[in-house]
Amino acid sequence: MPAPGPERRRCLTGTALNLERKVRTDPRARIAGAFGIAFGLFAGTGTAGLAMALALAGLWGLFFGFTARGRPLDRSLGQTVKRAGEAWLFLFLFVFWVLMTSFWSPAQGLAAETVRRLATLAILGPIVVWAVHACTGQDRLLAQRAIVAGVFTALAILTSEAISHYAMTYIATPYKEPLEIAGDMGRGATATLVLFWVAFACLHQQQSDTRVRFALVVLALFVAFQFGTDLNALGLVVGTLVALLTLRIPRFMLALVTAGTAVLVAAAPMIYPTLADLAHRALPGEAMPLSYGRRAQMWEVASHLIMQKPLTGWGLGAGSTFDAPIAYGGISWPIIQLHPHSAPLHIWLETGGIGALLASLAIVTGGGVAIRLYGRYPVAAAALAGGLTFLAISWGFSHAAWREWVWVSFAALIAFSAMLRNPRRWRQARQ
């Protein structure tokens, strides 16, 4: 291959200098880069530090937004209200109502702690999303590279831990039991795989080597089948199918994913007991695997409890107070283990129909915003739809509604999928 001529070398040099100057003069690109890499590091080690990573990035963004020349955060708030005011309104009302339910919670200590955490995420999460969304031009390339590096880092750590039977984790926390470590690693895998489609799309836009993309797919598939978290494998398959369909019909698929999630939340007290009943009919007695049998049992119990306080719910943190013993698989369990292992049911149980209605409206209006912003960019829409589908499956059928790492993963997905709204692939991205 002939060496580039003088004119070509000047062009490449100028591009490199412009990128360096842009990063140096706009701290938001650094915020995006630091958050992307920190996300991968903390997700790979079990999600414990994800909320801290988002909080630090949010504080950095808040400081810049109110101290930089022209107070860019002030201007952005006004633009956001114009573009997506209805979605932010319902999201704010939902968070406000969730925090309000702490006043009648029977678990005041847990409720107070949850209020502090949710309030922090509700304030600083949008700041991080704003900082990443503000990246333009070559800054977007920096943000893309950061999240790709973060996802690869997390997948590499998780793969190493799975192969070595948690060798590094045992060194850091020798007091943890294997099942507890597997749970931590499973949650880390879930948080990482939410961004799998974003990372793959970034590599596609950067025209990366095919072997790099192949390595990403292989690592993601391997991690999805580790740590006893079956929903990760299911979510990866379904999310990929949704992403492929979204490439063809982006607006319709975004509408379908968000509407389906909203229905799952709004109709949870009817959907989950029906699924549990079907499962018991197909596998009567205790024929179901322990994890799924207990899950179906908790769904039925939670649905009965919801009917007792259908409007306002039992209060934030109340799920942890239903600890009457119940037998399954020859073992005595709390009737609900901290939460019903279904975020939609968890919302209904603790915040009632009011909370579920506000959550559903926030999802529907947020879907409308996504269609407007991503409808003309199939690659970005596919990455967002794949991640949302995966998150909806994991969140809807396994995790608590208020897990900080779930909301940090959601914020990262919203932030970095926006970096894919480019009309073409990056040229000379590897220079």
Image: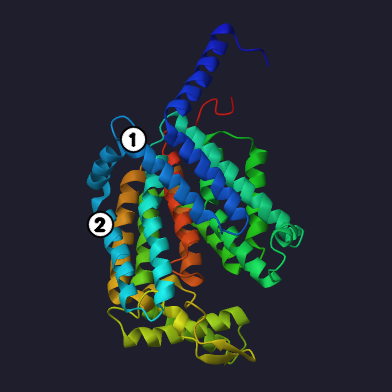
Amino acid at pointer 1: Thr
Q: Residue 347, position in %: x, y?
A: 38, 72
Frontmost residue, 78 versus 344:
78
Picture residue at 64% right of the left edge, 51% below the top: 155
Residue named by callout 1:
67
Name which residue lies at 46% across and 32% down.
139
Q: Name the residue tied to disc 2.
A: 89
Crowding at mark 2 (Cα within 10 Å: few <14, some 14-19, many 20+): some
Foreground of the two, 233 or 350: 350
- Say which element carries label 1: helix
Query: In the rendered view, does 197 fall on the left or right side of 369?
Result: right
Q: Position of residue 172 (x, y in %)?
A: 70, 58
Give whichever of 372, 39 is nearer the camera: 39
Q: Position of residue 311 (x, y in %)?
A: 27, 79
Q: Using the numbered discs, state the Cα–Cα distance from disc 1 to disc 2 in whole angstroms.
A: 26 Å
Image position of 70 with respect to 101: above or below: above
Whether residue 244 is visible here, answered yes or no, is no
